[in-house]
Each structure stands twice: as C-alpha cells, then as structure tokens.
Amino acid sequence: MVTLKELAKLLNVSVSTVSKALSDSSEIGESTKRRVTELANELNYKPNRIAQQLKSSKTKVVGVVVPSLMNPFFAEVVHGIETTLGSHNYDMTVCISNESLEKEQRSFDLLSTGSVDGFIVAVARETQTKHNIKHFENVSRTTPIVMFDRVLNDVACSKVIVNDYQSVYDTTRYFIERENRKNILLISNIEELSVGKYRIDGYTKAIEEAGLKTKVLKLGRELNPRPLIFDYLKENKDLDAIVSIDHITGIMALNKAKLLGKNIPEDISIIGFGYADSKYVSSPNISVINQKGFEIGETSAKLLLEELNSKSRVKHKTIMVKSQLNLNDTSKKV
Amino acid sequence: MVTLKELAKLLNVSVSTVSKALSDSSEIGESTKRRVTELANELNYKPNRIAQQLKSSKTKVVGVVVPSLMNPFFAEVVHGIETTLGSHNYDMTVCISNESLEKEQRSFDLLSTGSVDGFIVAVARETQTKHNIKHFENVSRTTPIVMFDRVLNDVACSKVIVNDYQSVYDTTRYFIERENRKNILLISNIEELSVGKYRIDGYTKAIEEAGLKTKVLKLGRELNPRPLIFDYLKENKDLDAIVSIDHITGIMALNKAKLLGKNIPEDISIIGFGYADSKYVSSPNISVINQKGFEIGETSAKLLLEELNSKSRVKHKTIMVKSQLNLNDTSKKV
DNA sequence: ATTAAAATGGTCACACTTAAAGAGCTTGCA
DNA sequence: TGCAAGCTCTTTAAGTGTGACCATTTTAAT
C-alpha cells in the first residue's frame, strides 16, 4: 500500500506538498503537480480511507440492520438502500438481527463507535415485543437513525413507513364492493408486529363497516403453517376471498385452495403482500399489495443522507411510501 | 464521543495510563485501574474503531460483493457469511454488482484502499462473459479474496464451489434409472455462466450415457420466460421429466405443467435448483437440488478468516460444498 | 541512603489534512 | 541602489485516537 510519505520521499518533496498536489490545490506549482500526479498514477496511489476517516471523523459508511435477508421484502429494501448510497459514494455495513434483540443491540454497539455515520434499521421482532429501545436512544444522541417498516413510535428519529392500515382497508373494500365478496378471511403470521396490527385493523374496519363478520387466521411464528391453512380452508368452504398480510402465506393459501379444487378467482379471490415480481413464483400470478421495497430503501437512504449532510440538526421526518395494489390473476378483473 | 484524552484529563492521569488501565495491563496499579474503568463505564467509553484500525492496519471488516440480493441463493449465502463473520467479531460491507462489471470494479477499487481486510465475491455475469479480471488481480496482490459459486479459474485465490456437474448428472440419472424417465428436459437461464455450463454438461453426460436424446431449453436473460416455458411444454407433450438449473424456472415449469393438466409427479417429474425452504412457495412442494447457500457462506467466510489470521501466506484452497437432492412432491418416491 | 520494584508519564507512529510559517523570488519606490 | 513589500511555492507543525515502547517518577524495603 503506497502512502503519501513514500511518494514524498521518492520525489524529494514534503508530504504536504504531495497531499496538496493530489488535491489540485492552487498553492502548488504546475510542474510539481504534474510530477506528483504522474508518479501517483504510476504507483497506483489511492489515499487510505481509514486515515481520511480518522481525520475527518466521517466514514461515509451507513450501518444497515435488518431482521433477515431471506425475506424478499427486506432484500429489496436493502437493494434500494445500496443503490442510493452507492450513487453518493457511501458504503453500507449490513447486519442481520435475525429478529433477535441481543444481536441488534450488539450491532448498534459495535458500529456506533466510529464505524458508521448513521443507521438504517427495521427493528427486530423481539425488540418490538419486549419494547427495549435503550440502544436506539443511546445511539441517536450522536448518530442519526432512520427506521423503516418496523418502526418504534417513541424513538426520536426519521421514519419511512408503509400505509399498512389503508392498503389492507382498501383491499378489503375492493373485495366487498367490486367483487361482491361476503366471506373474507385474513391470514396473518405477524400479528405481534405493529405493522401486522395496522393491517389487521384496516381489514377489521372495512369488514365491520360493511356489516360483515371478521375472520382472522393468526399463525404466529409457526414454522410450517401450511397444514393450519389447509385445515382452515377445508373447514370453511364458504370463504370467497383471502387477504394475506405477509409475503409467503398468500402463496401458501393459493396453493392450498387449488388443492381443494377451488377455481381461482371465480370461487375465491386471493390477494397477498409482496413485491413487483412476486407473481412469478405462483400460478396463477398472485395479486399482491406491492410494498415497494426498493422505493422504501431509496427513501430511507435519502432521508439519512439529508441528515448527514446538513450542518444544522434537521427535524425528524416521517415519510409514507404508499403500497400499490397489483391486480394479477388471483382476483377478478372488475 | 468520549476519548482516552478526555478520560485522562478528568482523572488527572496521562493518556497512556488510561489506555493501559483499560487493557488491564499489569503495569498499572489496582486502585487507578478501578478509578479508570469506573469513569469509563460511567461515560460509556468505547475505543474509536477507526483509530484502532489505523493503528493496527486491520479493519476487521470484509467486503462482500454479490450480483444480487433478490436471488434467494445469494441472500442465503450472505446470511451464512454474516453469521460466521459475526461470531468472529468481523463486520461486512455489502456491495451489489447488479451483474455489472463496472459496478464490481468500482466496489473493489473503493474498498481495497484500506476499508476491508479481505473480499468474498461471486463474480458478475458481465465480468464472466467479458472475462475482465484486472480488478481481482490488482487487489489479490495485497488483499485475500475468496470466490464462491461464480468462480474464475485463472484468478489465484481460494474458492468455494458447488458440485454443479455432479449434482445435475446425479439428478438426471435419478430420473433415468429410478423413475425410468425417457424424455427429460433441461431448462436454463444461466447458460453463459460457468456454473450453468457445468450443470448442462452434467445433464448431457447422463443423457448420452443412457443413449437418450438431450433436450435443452435455453432462456437467456429473458425477463419473463414463462410464455417460452409454456409453449415448449405444450409442443412437447411427451416430456416426462424436467431439470431446471436455477431457482425460479423450476417453479415456473411446475406451474405451467399443472396448467396443461399434467399430474405431478405421475405424468411428469420436476426437480429444480433451490434452497431448503424453496418448497414452501410451490404446490406440490417442489423437489430441488439444494445448493446449501448458508453453508457456502459459512465456508467462504471461514476460508477468508483463515487466510486473514495466518501470518504466513497460506496456499489457496478450493472447497466443494456438495449440494443435496431434496426429494419432495414433484418427483416420485422410489 | 541505596536500590529495586511498582506505577505513571512521554514520545512516536499509523496516513492523512490543513493552518501557519518560511524561503526565495520579483517588484516598486525612495 | 537598496530594501521593504508582495508573491509564489514549499515546508513545518499540529492534530485526528490509539497503543507500543521507553523513560521517568514514586514508593517501599533494605
């Protein structure tokens, strides 16, 4: 690794001359500038980023802490984050909390000691259920945090949220009003998360407004919930529509309904949560509430960069990224 | 951010005393040690990692460069990497090449200037087709690299590969010998990648050994290949087995075959590539060649950590992580 | 008082940036 | 002609936080 010092020695000038020449400072004569840049190119000199970081006390690195990468929603968000950060010459350190409070805390502890300029986080399930927010509060005093999707209302920081309530409310009303459905089931495996509660609330409101009966199948953290779904569908043959509020149980319900000989969407409509390409893994193409993960990632990153690059402390914002109802082939075209 | 200097001033001792006290050096008296550690805890002192990194010229950070995170295989590998690195107190900086050579080069350029101790990479599609390896060669002189899955034979570094040839060979023979299949189709959308070639070779060998006719459907980079698959299946009604060599086209083929009224696995067997939980998104549960992404990630990280922690230059290793045939419900139980 | 051991302090280097000082010129004016 | 003033280019010095190494001071025992 060639350093300024070595270049200086080879050129018989001082270190600061080399430094200034390379940053094209007006203090340095043209001829020396040329000598310096030539040698620097020849030896492929690149300034050591760690030293720059120490000097400037800025790392140009963002810590990204997510519960999982196997959930395509989070993978998509991370992709969006990476894209935006990259175009501003920021890097990201990714930590996976695995839904564990302790792992999340450790990540924040480790990275908050100078390693990153800011954080983007979707809080772990355990953090949300136990409501332990000390690590966020400690860090947020000195380092900006942006939360997305899984958000804690009592942590003072910027947030990017999804219109969870409204999207499920709208979808349920779509079933009721446009498709004339009467027996609408909601399937959930994230009912303990705030976003899960909002979604269930949206469903409940729409159902009650229409004077129908709510039917909610809560799967909890069941590892293989497919038998539960199958049994429920078998015992409730009068169902004519299903809303699933996460990305996987919708496809499971679709497959189980087909297995029970249902025609989709004639006998029963299904709308799940997902992303733009969700439909590719099911047949027929599943209709989804598209959460716009990429956009959420972009927005989160932009929000954080704004905070990082403004001298004065900016006010915390909360931005809602509206999801989009992608009607494919498991709901009626009306 | 509280520093050694500040602690020293508050305690009326020198910086080096504080430093030694906190590292529990025997040079320091018990009483001062206690005073120092107490104040350090009170003020929540954590050594600045950037300064430590500069001092030690080690970052304890690994650069991970992958083509995509939306591909669950890569997501799983990254998860495995993160788990192993985390248990050794390493962090990872993740860059997504998006299959682009230029983006990959930029990531290597940026991170190789002191930001990371080593790299783990699956080379981008474009890098592989254009065979541009300068950025790897430059970096590998000073920084260890581990390649996984998408590997370049002429770059001198450690590698973690999958038994691509053998796994598809075995699968094809399984169809031929155990299921007595005669018309076996291979579906590919990664035929330009080395791993794709190996897989196709394995299939071809098995088919030719059995005196059967090879049938290969190459989809290239077609964004929505489902019509192509559908048409092929419709025009080749005598197919009785399908091997798909990537994680998504297998499920597509399964869905299209069902659409054409095939009984699975009675009429036609399907085995795709995937991961442990692939089966959850299809009905019936798809049989897959499970690439063991998590294990590949763990192995890559371990290999890199070995190189980083051995003083002497270690010989480059190539480790094969054998994939596992997970027979679920789209192939016969025989 | 001597001396060794114990405890603490000082210096430097890691690689870089930048403010301030200095060296070597030319210019201009008495 | 002499010399201060001004200009350009370059160097010196200081600082970022840490930790290794060496030097110095303090303590206690003889």
Image (cartoon, coloured by chain):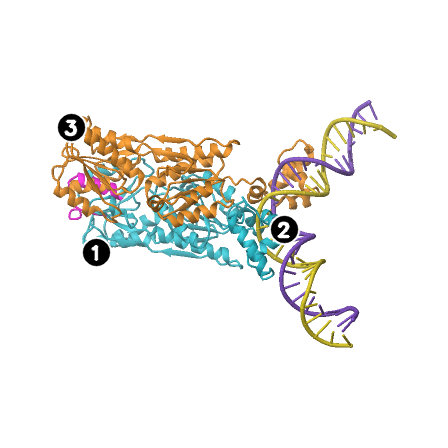
Chain colours: A cyan, B orange, C yellow, D purple
In the rendered image, which residue does mark 3 sit on? B180
Q: What quarter of the picture does the N terminus of chain A occupy?
A: top right
Number of residues whose C-alpha sits closer than 10 Å to that of mark 3, classed few (under 14), some (14–19) or many (20 or more): few
Residue A51 can be seen, yes or no: yes
Q: Which residue is mark 2?
A: A12
> Quick one: SS at disc 2?
loop
Position of B54 with respect to A242 (left or right) is: right
Amino acid at dot 3: Asn
Which one is in front, B44 or A298? Answer: A298
Q: Are marks 3 and 1 on the same chain?
A: no
Q: Is residue A21 above or below residue B217?
A: below
User: Which of the two discs, 2 and 1, sits closer to the camera?
Assistant: 2
Numbered mark located on residue A128 in the image: none
Q: Please determine whether, in this image, residue B91 is positioned above or below residue A119.
A: above
Q: Which residue is mark 1?
A: A177
Q: Position of residue A67 (x, y in %)?
A: 40, 42
Give the extent of the magenta segment.
A250-270
From the top left corner, tell me how far across and down residue C3 is, in percent: 81, 27
How crowded pointer 2 is (Cα within 10 Å; few <14, some 14-19, many 20+) is rated as few
Element type where label 1 sits in the image: helix
Work out whether C3 lies above or below B86. above
What amino acid does circle 1 point to?
Answer: Glu
Q: Which chain does the residue under circle 1 lie in?
A: A
Q: Nearer the viewer, mark 3 or mark 1?
A: 3
2 vs 3, front mark: 2
- Under circle 3, the secondary element is loop
A137 above or below A322?
A: above
